[in-house]
Image (cartoon, helix red, strand yellow):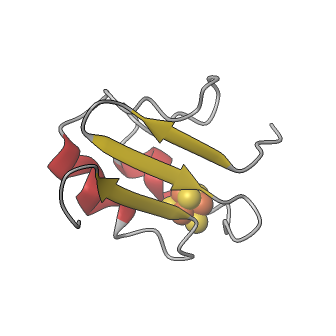
Amino acid sequence: MKINFREFSNDNITITYDPCVCQQSDTCAKQLSNVFRNSVIPWIDIDGAPPEKINSQVKKCPSGALKFSFKNKVA
Ligand code: SF4
């Protein structure tokens, strides 16, 4: 499935995804499948887990393709 650069936001957080640097390792989908869903559009369900849990998973992205920020504070 081809995915373009995307930004996902709700009232509290923003996640961005850059497919140009993604290593397609599926680390995110394997470890937090409620949020990072590789067979569903949109592939990121920003409300699929608590923000802190999403932030923790984003930090494990080996390529830096995923970025996380809180809207009212620095992550
Ligand atoms: S963890 Fe990062 S590099 Fe791996 S599939 Fe997810 S976005 Fe891509």
Spot the residue most to the top.
41
Is residue 22 among the parts visible in the rendering? yes
Q: Considering the image in quadrants, where does the C terminus appear?
A: bottom left
Q: In which quarter of the image is residue 17?
A: bottom right
Nearer-the-camera pick, 18 or 53: 18
Q: Considering the image in quadrants, where does the N terminus appear?
A: top right
Where is residue 61? Give x, y as percent: 46, 68
Q: In which quarter of the image is residue 25?
A: bottom right
Where is residue 5? Give x, y as percent: 71, 50
Q: What residue is drawn where x is 50% and y is 61%?
A: 66
Q: What residue is drawn where x is 50% and y is 76%?
A: 62
Looking at the image, residue 21 lies above or below residue 38? below
Where is residue 56? Give x, y as percent: 24, 61
Where is residue 70? Give x, y as percent: 25, 53
Q: What residue is drawn where x is 45% and y is 53%?
A: 28
Looking at the image, residue 48 lies above or below residue 73? above
Nearer-the-camera pick, 24 or 22: 22
